[in-house]
Image: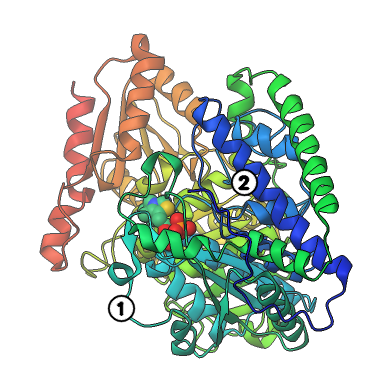
Amino acid sequence: MKPTNSSVNFNYSINNLDETLLLSLYRNMLKPRLIEERMLVLLRQGKISKWFSGIGQEAISVGVTMAIHSDEYILPMHRNLGVFTTRKIPLYRLFAQWQGKASGFTKGRDRSFHFGTQQYKIVGMISHLGPQLGVADGIALASKLKNKNQVTAVFSGEGGTSEGDFHEALNVASVWQLPVLFCIENNGYGLSTPTHEQYNCKDLAARGIGYGMESHIIDGNNIVEVYTKVNALAKDIRRNPRPILVEFKTFRIRGHEEASGTKYVPEELITSWTTKDPLLNFEAFLKAETIITEELEADFKAEINKEINEHLKVANEEEEIKPNESEELSDVFQLIKNEGINSKSKPEEIRFIDAISSSLKESMIQHEDLVIMGQDIAEYGGAFKITEGFIDQFGKERVRNTPICESAIIETAMGLSIAGIKSVVEMQFADFVSSGFNPVVNYLAKSYYRWKQNADVVIRMPCGGGVAAGPFHSQTNEAWFTKTPGLKVVYPAFPYDAKGLLNQAINDPNPVLFFEHKALYRNIRQEVPTDYYTLPFGKASVIKAGNDVTIVSYGAAVHWVLETLDNNPDISADVIDLRTLQPLDLERIYASVKKTGKAIILQEDSLFGGIASDISANIMEQCFKYLDAPVMRVASMETPIPFAAQLEQQYLPKNKFETALKTLLAY
Ligand SMILES: Cc1ncc(C[n+]2csc(CCOP(=O)(O)OP(=O)(O)O)c2C)c(N)n1
């Protein structure tokens, strides 16, 4: 149903708003409306693939965007075309984005509003909705750390407020008093789900209060109310940085997306909300007040339609993207110098854990903005005491205790990166990254490829078994990440490598999962330079040279290999410690296998789907004619990792390795 009313159903308190401002509020709402009406035509003609309508909700996008300064970030959702148009993005770029063309914002790699642009300070959504909110926390944290007194505005539908991300983001923002304006657009339905099936409270605004946050309810269809109230709130946040939640009451008068229709919405709801159309009511008001004439209205429409036509023509005439494999592959990671920085100091013998701690400390000095976040890492010094004493040297702003909100903190790290700040996030145990899995594999991993926004984040992962800690404190879960393009995965076995690689990980502007085996922390010592140095990624180290077999491993399992060889001095083996799993030094492996003719891979994780399988497959494909035996993989049992020491020993592959190695040598 097309809104047609012309009476004024709102009380517009224009007070001291001047005519120019009122006209631009009107014009800024008119533009997305006219674009959408055109998109609906194109959709029917099959010229665009999907459309999420924001018709009837324009006052929120436009009012909020006009109240936020143009250098303040705004994080819109799929119905917020008005944010993009009010920020004056050239329309041909939007049209090209929707057609998957190069002048869009993602080189055809993502659709609709799934993009961001630093130029316009807009950070678009990922499909999962909720992560936007935690990312806004990070941007707001950066503003607070740099004393910028800026507001970050972020949107969510009422459906999105049911996601854990929403609750974590509100909690973190409130505990840290971050200057975020959380904007909930309560439009009655999340796809076909009505509000009473989505939540069980009267107003979502109450959720702000639950998190210790000021909150407000605003009539989302009254542009004057939206603009004036948000403008006042934004000013207040700039003066007194803190989060505020606003629930905008509105209604989605079209389908979730055009193909899904509105059959499940009672007709009378659509009819009554149509009379509250934000554009037509305001238009009628401006006419009644003689602020706009029929002529001026026609001029506005003609100008906007002309702009739409011209820009559509530009986008339509742009050639389709020509796929180019090497361009796709080279856009997964931001380029970085990967040469390694040499140390100049005399080495000292330290433990693995000291190497990690020393890297973090030196990196905090090296990068003066670097922020470390994690549970209990400040006064308490972290579960493993790696950051003990850090707050005395670097202060609590940079060494941040976090609530138990893995998702929101990883999203916050993403937001910091958007605002130009590096961060390291400590998982208390690698197992708990599953509570922040979505932002790692969908936000951090894909953001550079999608819109060239790097995720300058290192996630530290204290991992691994042999410590009788049971299924949730012993996993080595690198395989969850090695299969996700866009993530680098580092897994050192020695203190020297741990320090040099962690320094490199923090230098790297891309997301890095840094695995630290807990069993190595206090058991493995090595001479390590006392000053700052880095080691390049993607370079395995050959820690023993021999002729009969190639042994490939990483992490604690490298030490099991060395123990086995100590007990069998007659075995002549090349031992390759991978050090990084992504990038993976396959060339080093191939060179060794071509020499020895036999290969065995030892991995601590259970066998199926682990990196040993991929290494094995690559050796078979690339070195088949050099092989004298099938490539062998030795790994843990296909069960969760158990607690009781004797069960854990049976589970881990350490004791099976010697037999497998001897079987291979005898082949
Ligand atoms: C994590 C996740 N679950 C489900 C979906 C599918 N989905 C996309 S939009 C949507 C409804 C969202 O409702 P709401 O947040 O109220 O926003 P609205 O579409 O009403 O503006 C759903 C279920 C999704 N994109 N992400």
Mark closest to the chain's N terminus, 1 or 2: 2
**Alpha carbon of mark 1 to alpha carbon of mark 2: how far?**
33 Å
Q: Is mark 1 within 8 Å of ligand 1?
A: no
Amino acid at dot 1: Asn
Q: Residues within 10 Å of mark 1 (few under 14, many from 20)?
A: few
Horizontal relation, residue 621 to residue 349: left or right: left
Look at the numbered disc 2 and give the secondary structure of its residue: loop
Q: Which label sits on residue 115?
A: 2
Q: Are marks 1 and 2 in contact (CB under 8 Å)?
A: no
Q: Nearer the viewer, residue 274 or 533?
A: 274
Q: Residues within 10 Å of mark 2 (few under 14, many from 20)?
A: many
Secondary structure type for disc 1: loop
Q: Amino acid at mark 2?
A: Phe
Residue where numbered disc 1 is placed: 200
Residue 344 showing in the rendered view: no
Which quadrant holds the C terminus? top left
Residue nearest the observer in this picture, 490 or 183: 183
330 above or below 63? Answer: above
Task: Locate residue 77, reporting x and y percent.
Answer: 55, 56
Residue 37, picture quadrant: top right
